[in-house]
Amino acid sequence: MPEEIDRQAPGHVELLTAVEVAAILRVSPAWVYAETRRRRIPHIRLGRYVRYRTDAITRWMQDLETSSGAAPPVLPRPLSIDGRVRRSTRSSGRPAGRP
């Protein structure tokens, strides 16, 4: 039988799925995924999976609330599981060989 996780233990991080974040925000999961792709919502990439830290989502909502009317906050680029900044796989839209 697996051990129970102590959710109050120091260092424990609660991770949410896009569906759970959508329920908290009362939006569709598709909206959460779209905002994630646009890097407008804090998230963590774990290989092909995306998760959201509860405290990061709470802080993000507070920042949005206090900065209403201002430009949306610039979020840091998501980190991969090994802690390196993920590189975009999208092309820049420029023809090859041109700066």
Image (spheres, helix red, strand yellow):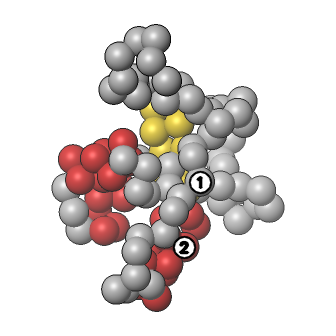
**Would residue 56 be found to the left or right of residue 96 on screen?**
right
10 Å crowding of disc 2: few (<14), some (14-19), many (20+): few
Is mark 1 in CB contact (under 8 Å) with mark 2? no
Tell me, yes or no, if residue 16 can be seen here: no
| Identity of the residue drawn at 43% across and 57% down | 41
Depth check, front residue: 96 or 73: 96
Residue at 70 percent of width and 65 percent of height: 8
Q: Earlier in the sequence, mark 1 or mark 2?
A: 2
Residue at the spot x=59%, y=54% of the render?
76
- Cα gap from disc 1 to disc 2, whole angstroms: 14 Å
Q: Quadrant of residue 68?
A: bottom left
Quarter containing the N terminus: top right
Depicted 24 relative to depicted 3: above or below: below
Seen from the viewer's position, the closer of residues 3 and 58 is: 58
Q: Position of residue 55 (x, y in %)?
A: 58, 67
Q: Which residue is the site of mark 1?
A: 76
Name the residue that disc number 2 marks: 59
Q: Pointer 1: residues within 10 angstroms few (<14), some, or many (20+)?
A: few
Q: Residue drawn at (50%, 49%), measured in percent from left and top?
A: 43
Q: Is residue 76 left or right of residue 63?
A: right
Q: Secondary structure at mark 2?
A: helix
The amino acid beneath tag 1 is Pro
Residue found at the very far top of the displayed protein: 97
Q: Secondary structure at mark 1?
A: loop
Q: Number of labelled discs?
A: 2
Question: Percent from the top left, x then y, of residue 72?
Answer: 41, 70
Q: Position of residue 6 (x, y in %)?
A: 70, 56
Residue 28, numbered circle: none
Going by the numbered disc 2, the residue's amino acid type is Arg
